[in-house]
Amino acid sequence: MLKKISIVIPVYNEEKNIPLVFDGIQKAFSVLPQYSFEVIFVNDGSRDNSLLEILKLSHENSNVRGIDFSRNFGKEAATSAGCHRACGDAVITMDADLQHPPTLIPKFLELWEQGVEVVYTVRKENKGAGIFKKLSSRLFYFVFNKVSEVKTESGTTDFRLMDKKVIEVFRRFPERERMFRGMIDWMGYKRQKIEFVAPERLYGNAGYSYVKLVRLAINSLTSFSLLPLRLAGYLGICITLISGLLLAMMLVADWFFAPGMFTPIAILGVSNMFLIGIVLISLGFITLYIARIHNEVINRPLYIVREEINGIEQ
Ligand code: UDP
Ligand code: MG
């Protein structure tokens, strides 16, 4: 039997790109007769004729499947929906806008055949992205890597290949606020990267407005790190220490050395600071408990087993 590769493509207003990306994929597989492939287009509430294009392709080709969302749910949801329904031995996720060149597919499969379970790509250059987008993406990766438990390289994209077993585990992830890339990175497995130069988007506009990107960045940070919450606690510790020390010095000076040196208002102000610090520390404590609830609620698997050796059953 031929090995089957599923290709998942989230689509938001890509009517002109859909036939082109399918052409590219077909060309890539024309030199790979040892594989069969299916393409799953996930129409994420497009406002143009993307759905018609998907329907047209699926009539002409039995290996084109599609999912039509009732509205725009975002790329992360669309990619997840495709992966949930993919039935190949490996799944490749890619964008519809040809910024993820299908010519890399043979390379993906070559690495996969060598036993790599996650092949991911790093963009060396993103043609067409403005300086602001480049800088903000850098900044995001810098902060993300500093605060989160999984490390992600700057420039990694959603153009990836995942072995069937990785996708099977992914299907068990119930979390709602999700970042596809981060979740796959969190899972581990044998990984290898490929670098590529992203060409400019051919038709249409990037569907990710800055507002959506900021939302995604916040989602990513909050689902992989609790640092933003803990900051309140750390701030509280600093404020309490500094104002406590100051208050002690003021009181000692006032009582023993120079009575009346500080006005009561000054002493009241510093005492107030001290109390604010204590309130913030309490928030920090609450964070510790929220962290536990957060971990329970996102309900990730405790561990991921790649293989049971010599018949160890659960
Ligand atoms: N996309 C989507 N839903 C959205 C926005 C984008 O499914 O709400 C798809 C889009 O059609 C494309 C991919 O996600 O296939 C990447 O989108 P885009 O090119 O806008 O992002 P960028 O290249 O800037 O990362
Ligand atoms: Mg794009």
Image (cartoon, helix red, strand yellow):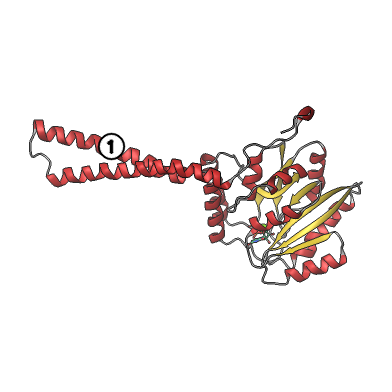
The residue lying at 57 percent from left, 50 percent from top is: 137
Which residue type does callout 1 highlight? Ile
In this figure, which residue is indicated by the disc labeled 1?
A: 242
- Residue 131 pos. (x, y %): 56, 54
- Residue 49 pos. (x, y %): 73, 72
The residue lying at 54 percent from left, 51 percent from top is: 135
Residue found at the very far top of the displayed protein: 310
Q: Secondary structure at mark 1?
A: helix
Q: Quadrant of residue 111?
A: top right
- Residue 156 pos. (x, y %): 65, 46
Q: Is residue 224 visible?
A: no
Q: Is residue 167 left or right of residue 56?
A: left
Q: Is residue 131 left or right of residue 246?
A: right
Q: Is mark 1 within 8 Å of ligand 1?
A: no
Q: Is residue 110 visible?
A: yes
The answer to whether residue 312 is above or below residue 297 is above
Quarter of the image with the C terminus is: top right
Number of numbered discs: 1
Q: Quadrant of residue 52?
A: bottom right
Foreground pick, 68 / 56:
68
Foreground pick, 154 / 135:
154
The residue lying at 75 percent from left, 33 percent from top is: 307
Q: Residues within 10 Å of mark 1 (few under 14, many from 20)?
A: some
- Residue 142 pos. (x, y %): 53, 43
Q: Is residue 255 left or right of residue 42?
A: left
